[in-house]
Image (cartoon, helix red, strand yellow):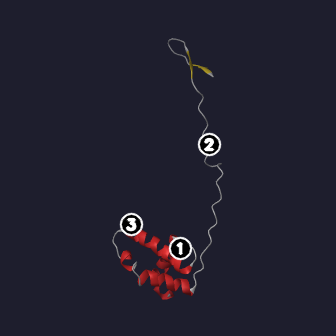
Amino acid sequence: MTTYIPSCSQQTIDVPTPKAKPSKRNAKKEPLATKRSVRWGDESVAALFRLRYSSHLTTRFDSKNNAEKKTAYVMLATELSVVMESEYDVAQVQDKVHKFDFYPSLT
């Protein structure tokens, strides 16, 4: 496409037409994979707290370094998954521990 741009020399310059950006509002998002919620039974809660407070992982949670605490939660979720033979997510384990730490009367 040739566009006429007035200037001193009266020349025409080829200027490419700008491309339209795709709208973020109308962009279709892929549906998120549905996560199965974990049912916490007495056995799984007991295993969680045994691993959290009475195992080799206990000292890792006392660290002042947040990266080490995150690593400890990953290890806790992994070991709990192995012990219970079910998949436990790090966020699920953290939520459960925090609920019981925040509301000790629930135990």
Q: Residue under circle 1?
A: 92
Q: Residue under circle 3?
A: 67
Label 1: how many residues lie within 10 Å, few (<14), some (14-19) or many (20+)? some
Examine the image and state in which quarter residue 86 appears: bottom right
Q: Residue furthest left?
A: 64
Instruction: Please provide percent x and percent y for residue 100.
Output: 48, 82
SS at badge 1: helix
Cα distance in 3D space between marks 2 and 3: 38 Å
Q: Residue under circle 2?
A: 22
Contact (Cβ within 8 Å) of mark 2 with mark 3: no
Q: Say which amino acid is labelled 2.
A: Pro
Cα distance in 3D space between marks 3 and 1: 18 Å
Give the tally of numbered discs.
Answer: 3
**In the displayed structure image, the side of residue 56 where residue 40 appears, left or right:** right
Give the mark, 2 or 1, whose residue is nearer the N terminus.
2
Q: Residue furthest top?
A: 9
Q: Is residue 94 visible?
A: no
Examine the image and state in which quarter residue 19 appears: top right
